[in-house]
């Protein structure tokens, strides 16, 4: 390299490092050591040099945060370790229960004499993201998505200044950093004021503004919105290729020490509000101090988070399918508001439970307009003396369904009417009754009740069950209303002409749908069990049961004791499974399914024989396909193990091209990427 270029390269590197260090002072330590204008001088110097020597620009240079060309859609990224959720608590009693559970589980493994040490943190009200660093360089950022697969929002992540584009210090080969992207209140207000003046979108709260900005296809838009980031955890960490997460676990024993390490890598961590405390009194003191400070924080929080601080103990406590057992979100009490009940309807759920729902004068609570709220059951309505016409307090806590809390008797108008429980099912007119000591009334119509049937079919055909792509909720409603579907069995008896009678379906899509139905005849045992909609049997339990018994027959014959021997199956679940398979009607459905060739294969068989057809294949799509929406074709690709990219590059294996294909087609032809049409694609996946 020429001496001069080397000098310039060094100068650029030096400027990058200096700016990165100032970012760390600003974002990690909240303690800038130079003024904003001094920072700008450094940035300008770097920009000048880079404009003269564009070939010396690195992908991690602080100037490379301006946003790139808008995307058509986001690619998907599979998380190497799932991004789980947190269990919630709303009261100190819930928190005490959590602490007791932690203690009793630990006592089974270790001799525990002192209070458990907890790491306390704020529960930031933003969006969870995963940042992947490889050899210290940020390679991608993704949203949480469904916890397993998120969206690739790298371009938008790169414009967030508090996220380092490269790490400093002692970083591992691979590091998945997890944390929250959020918007400070002041930036939210400025953004909305600006948008009001300029006719832009007005966001309801900082969280929505952060989400809208992070998920904007145009990263130039994101770059103008001031997003922030704080790291609170991690996913995969590889120091030593052969033993992921091992080396670092020898080095770091507690949650707080890992976060200190993160700070040394230049990652922003909300240390000011972190506290390591002892036992239940420690965590409740922390909660109370944060409740006091809440309004003075520059950003929104919706509670606090407690984690067992010792990493060894975290491992001992383990995970449930959706959340770690060593952590708890202690949420703030929900937001409340007053509005009037204009009517009370009842809804019929999948298992026939009849739930009274209040129709409300629409009201804005905690960032959304609410016009319905649950009244839970008749008993609650009587107990609280809630009447139609009453002014009531409604409550909305996080994502929980809004509820009517109590009526304001002082405001009661003269002409309120009490609620009377329906005497028969409003959908199918069957009688309703209470089962055993349950409070809820249930419709006795079973699958004769179209509401139960519709909900049951929606569940049975959903992704984690029979997973029939293209069989949406509206189609189910229509087919039930027209009398084509009276049970799950009928789904597999549908003919093309049946489908064509529903105006929602055109001939081509009817053929495709029938193929998809046909393809779903041999689900895995766990999907089949989940599809049955047995009470208390969620996705994780269905998998445990399937792996334990291996065949449907042995599950049908299993005794309560057999069932109880399955991990995580308690007596309630065991009884419910037994009850389900002792009902003639259910066995009848299973036998009818079998007689038309619909039966499950063991998960084991499924895994070894049903190697995904498109595993490892990268697809791009262009133009309009004759019979499939984008969403459906993407689903087909992903269900078969392939991935879809929004743009095309040389890495793509296939381009699926439809009508009025654009630039992607030219690129594929120029670069020898296989171009296929819809028909060829269907062949690829055996449809
Ligand atoms: S720890 C296994 N810490 O809360 C999940 N989460 O309800 C570990 N959140 O999706 C998460 N602040 O987006 C953790 N200090 C914090 C948090 C936090 C906000 C969010 C996060 C997560 C959700 C779970």
Image (cartoon, helix red, strand yellow):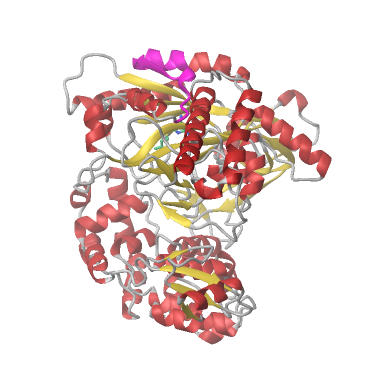
Is 104 colored magenta in this rendering? Answer: no
- Which residue occupies the foreground of this view, 476 or 7? 7
Quadrant containing ligand 1: top left
Segment tinted magenta in the rendering? 267-286
Instruction: Measuring from the top left, give residue 444's x and y in whole percent.
Output: 48, 58
Q: How many marks?
A: 0
**Residue 281 appears in the picture as rendered:** yes
**Residue farthest to the bottom?**
497
Q: Residue at x 80, y 36 (%)?
A: 415
The quadrant of the rendering that contains the C terminus is bottom left
Residue 65 vs 217, above or below: the answer is above
Q: Would residue 1 be found to the left or right of residue 448 on screen?
A: left
**Residue 392 appears in the picture as rendered:** no
Q: Residue at x 62, y 56 (%)?
A: 70
Q: Quadrant of residue 397?
A: top right
Q: Quadrant of residue 332?
A: top right
- Which residue occupies the foreground of this view, 562 or 77? 77
Q: Residue at x 48, y 79 (%)?
A: 675
**Residue farthest to the right?**
197
**Residue farthest to the front?**
3
Instruction: Measuring from the top left, give residue 404's x and y in whole percent.
Output: 63, 35
Residue 29 vs 511, above or below: the answer is above
Q: Residue at x 53, y 63 (%)?
A: 646
Residue 434 vs 649, above or below: the answer is above
Q: Would residue 655 be found to the left or right of residue 389 on screen?
A: left
Instruction: Measuring from the top left, give residue 509's x and y in whole percent.
Output: 55, 80
- Which residue occupies the foreground of this view, 403 or 543? 543
Is 280 colored magenta in this rendering? Answer: yes
Instruction: Measuring from the top left, give residue 445's x and y in whole percent.
Output: 49, 61
């Amino acid at each position: 390299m020429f001496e001069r270029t080397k000098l310039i390269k060094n100068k650029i590197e030096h400027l990058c490092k200096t700016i990165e260090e100032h970012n760390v002072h600003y974002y990690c330590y909240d303690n800038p050591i130079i003024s904003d204008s001094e920072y700008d001088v450094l940035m300008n110097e770097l920009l000048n040099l880079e404009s003269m020597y564009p070939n010396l620009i690195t992908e991690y240079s602080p100037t490379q945060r301006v946003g790139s060309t808008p995307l058509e859609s986001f690619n998907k990224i599979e998380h190497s370790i799932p991004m789980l959720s947190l269990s919630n608590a709303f009261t100190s009693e819930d928190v005490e229960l959590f602490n007791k559970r932690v203690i009793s589980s630990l006592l089974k493994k270790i001799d525990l004499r002192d209070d458990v040490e907890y790491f306390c943190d704020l529960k930031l009200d933003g969006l969870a993201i995963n940042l992947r660093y490889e050899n210290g360089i940020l390679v991608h950022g993704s949203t949480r998505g469904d916890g397993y697969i998120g969206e690739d929002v790298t371009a938008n992540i790169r414009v967030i200044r508090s996220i380092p584009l490269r790490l400093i210090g002692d970083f591992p080969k691979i590091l998945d950093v997890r944390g929250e992207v959020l918007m400070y209140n002041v930036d939210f207000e400025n953004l909305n004021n600006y948008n009001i003046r300029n006719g832009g979108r007005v966001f309801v709260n900082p969280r929505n503004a952060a989400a809208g900005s992070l998920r904007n296809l145009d990263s130039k838009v994101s770059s103008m919105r001031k997003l922030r980031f704080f790291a609170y955890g991690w996913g995969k960490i590889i120091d030593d290729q052969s033993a992921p997460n091992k080396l670092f676990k020898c080095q770091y024993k507690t949650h707080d020490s890992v976060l200190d390490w993160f700070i040394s890598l230049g990652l922003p961590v909300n240390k000011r509000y972190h506290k390591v405390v002892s036992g239940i009194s420690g965590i409740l003191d922390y909660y109370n101090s944060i409740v006091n400070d809440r309004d003075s924080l520059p950003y929104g929080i919706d509670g606090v988070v407690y984690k067992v601080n010792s990493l060894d103990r975290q491992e001992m406590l383990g995970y449930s399918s959706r959340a770690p057992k060593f952590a708890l979100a202690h949420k703030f009490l929900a937001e409340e508001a007053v509005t009037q009940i204009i009517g009370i309807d009842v809804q019929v759920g999948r298992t026939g439970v009849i739930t009274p729902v209040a129709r409300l004068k629409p009201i804005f609570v905690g960032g959304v307009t609410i016009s319905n709220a649950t009244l839970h059951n008749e008993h609650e309505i009587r107990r609280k003396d809630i009447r139609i016409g009453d002014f009531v307090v409604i409550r909305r806590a996080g994502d929980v369904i809004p509820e009517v809390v109590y009526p304001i008797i002082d405001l009661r108008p003269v002409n309120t009417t009490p609620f009377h429980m329906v005497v028969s099912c409003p959908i199918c007119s069957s009688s309703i009754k209470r089962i055993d000591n349950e409070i809820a009334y249930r419709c006795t119509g079973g699958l004769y009740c179209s509401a139960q049937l519709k909900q049951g079919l929606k569940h049975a055909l959903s992704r984690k069950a029979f997973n029939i792509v293209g069989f949406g909720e509206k189609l189910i409603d229509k087919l039930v209303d027209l009398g084509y579907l009276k049970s799950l069995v009928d789904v597999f008896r549908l003919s093309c002409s049946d489908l064509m009678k529903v105006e929602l379906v055109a001939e081509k899509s009817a053929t495709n749908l029938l193929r998809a139905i046909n393809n779903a005849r041999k689900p895995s045992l766990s999907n089949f069990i989940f599809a049955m909609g047995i009470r208390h049997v969620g996705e994780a339990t269905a998998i445990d049961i399937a792996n334990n018994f291996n065949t449907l027959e042995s599950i049908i014959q299993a005794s309560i004791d057999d069932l109880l021997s399955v991990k995580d199956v308690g007596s309630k679940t065991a009884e419910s499974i037994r009850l389900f398979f002792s009902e003639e009607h259910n066995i009848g459905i299973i036998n009818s399914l079998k007689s038309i060739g619909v039966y499950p294969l063991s998960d084991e068989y499924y895994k070894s024989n049903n190697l995904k057809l498109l595993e490892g294949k990268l697809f791009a799509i262009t133009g309009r396909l004759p019979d499939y929406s984008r969403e459906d074709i993407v689903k087909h690709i992903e269900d078969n193990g392939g991935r879809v990219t929004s743009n095309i590059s040389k890495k793509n294996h296939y381009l699926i091209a439809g009508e009025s294909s654009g630039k992607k087609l030219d690129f594929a032809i120029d670069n020898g990427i296989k171009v296929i049409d819809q028909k060829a694609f269907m062949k690829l996946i055996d449809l």
